[in-house]
Image: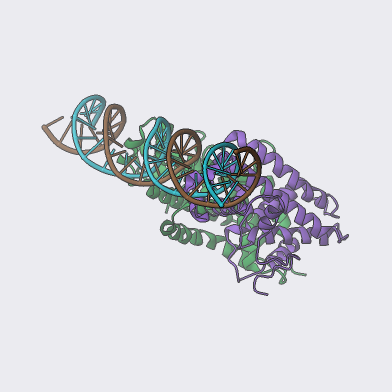
Chain colours: A purple, B green, C brown, D cyan
DNA sequence: CGAACTGTAACAATCGTTTGATACAAGCAT
DNA sequence: ATGCTTGTATCAAACGATTGTTACAGTTCG
């Protein structure tokens, strides 16, 4: 298990994002642009990524991208939306066959980490780039993120949690953790599954 | 060292960073520049902050800053070093009178959160801006950060921790949390102390 | 006076974006 | 088949704005 996918996709080493783009009826080039932009935004941040950088990644000139995108900002919002949707779908699929509240939470955490630590296409880290994005756009991003986080809200609501813990803070802390593991994670040392298990073990505080 | 506790200062709403700069023999302008740059880097990130932005904040033209700084990158490294040193000093001072391992960890977490959530001068969030900083500089930053994190390494080594938890991951997760609370924190709803207590409560897993 | 400071003005580079031309394939009329 | 049109995809080049940075002249002040 070199890359340890196991997601059910039998069509190669594609990332979840790639798969979602294929189904959206977009051309190869179009999805390549979205994918390259997602990776670059994740690596260097929005402000530090130029349109020409994205173009170079897909073998196009910077200006040529404007046949596919309306603006750099719109491109960012688009990627953000797709990435969150893909993540939500995968997490919902991962927890649906499980019934034990803690097992469901662990499955959600592991899936979330798999998405964020996927070396093929780091889609999610841009979730934290809110600081450097303009205010008007931030609203759209926050709205979509809130929808996404509802999954965890429900998951945590079902936990038999020690009443001394505030479920609101609990959720914020857990998501902060999951969203920022990519800051120190290096492939090979530890799998997303192992990290996810440790996270849930730490966050597990039953009644009494 | 940059010894200078911020909490006992009775000379106004200054941040810990400001206090440290005053003692460093720097002129008012010079420290104002460092402070403004720190705030802007924290707010919008390194790439999204221009030298002219910093100048405007202190009432100077962009070019005039170069009487005080060598380059934008050097300015960033400088701030990063000072901020980490200030944080380390304050945390060491906060834990020194305590002996109980969990109490020491809680004091360290609360102090860390106080520093990062200080609305007067958000100094630390730039600790996570590694992604958008050039590779050569990143080495200096990482080295200084490792030194800083040694405090937590020692703190965690003293914990009577459940052996099923890996202390390395434990430390990474805890620091990830502390470093990124600024992403969702809004003043007024909850104090750094309350958040710190919740964090330690979650991370508290004694032997047996 | 001289040193420390600040503004003026410009530099080359890069930014996001637009424009006009070009290549190429597909469709339709003749 | 040929020619004409239409649309898609790309490049080359440039736009004005902004970037980090510098040289230099001017001001302020001990």
Q: Position of residue A147 (x, y in %)?
A: 75, 43
- Which residue is located at x 78 percent, y 61 percent? A107
- Count the numbered circles shown: 0
User: Can residue A82 be seen in the rendering of this structure?
Assistant: yes
Q: Quadrant of the C terminus of chain A?
A: bottom right
Q: Foreground: B171 or A107? A: A107
User: Can residue A47 be seen in the rendering of this structure?
Assistant: no
Residue ranking furthest to the right: A99
In screen coordinates, is A179 left or right of B61?
right
Q: Position of residue C7 (x, y in %)?
A: 30, 27
Q: Position of residue B98 (x, y in %)?
A: 61, 57
Q: Position of residue A40 (x, y in %)?
A: 54, 53
In screen coordinates, is B61 left or right of A11?
left
In screen coordinates, is B75 left or right of D30?
right
Question: Which image quadrant for residue A204?
Answer: bottom right
Question: Which image quadrant for residue B166?
Answer: bottom right
B170 up-or-down from B192: above or below: below
Q: Quadrant of the N terminus of chain A?
A: bottom right
Q: Foreground: C11 or A157? A: C11
Q: Foreground: B204 or A13? A: A13
- Which residue is located at x 74 percent, y 59 percent? A109
């Amino acid at each position: 298990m070199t890359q340890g996918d196991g997601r059910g996709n039998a069509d190669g080493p594609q990332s979840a994002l790639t798969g979602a783009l294929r189904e959206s009826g977009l051309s190869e080039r179009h999805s390549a642009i979205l994918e390259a932009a997602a990776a670059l935004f994740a690596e260097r941040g929005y402000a530090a990524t130029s349109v020409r950088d994205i173009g170079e990644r897909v073998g196009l000139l910077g200006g040529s991208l404007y046949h596919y995108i309306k603006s750099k900002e719109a491109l960012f919002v688009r990627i953000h939306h797709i990435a969150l949707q893909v993540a939500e779908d995968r997490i919902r699929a991962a927890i649906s066959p499980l019934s034990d509240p803690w097992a469901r939470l662990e499955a959600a955490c592991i899936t979330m980490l798999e998405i964020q630590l996927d070396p093929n296409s780091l889609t999610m880290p841009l979730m934290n780039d809110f600081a450097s994005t303009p205010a008007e756009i931030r609203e759209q991003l926050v709205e979509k993120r809130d929808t996404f986080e509802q999954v965890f809200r429900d998951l945590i609501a079902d936990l038999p949690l020690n009443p001394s813990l505030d479920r609101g803070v609990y959720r914020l802390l857990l998501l902060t953790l999951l969203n920022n593991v990519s800051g120190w994670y290096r492939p090979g040392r530890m799998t997303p599954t192992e990290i996810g298990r440790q996270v849930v073990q730490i966050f597990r505080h039953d009644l009494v």
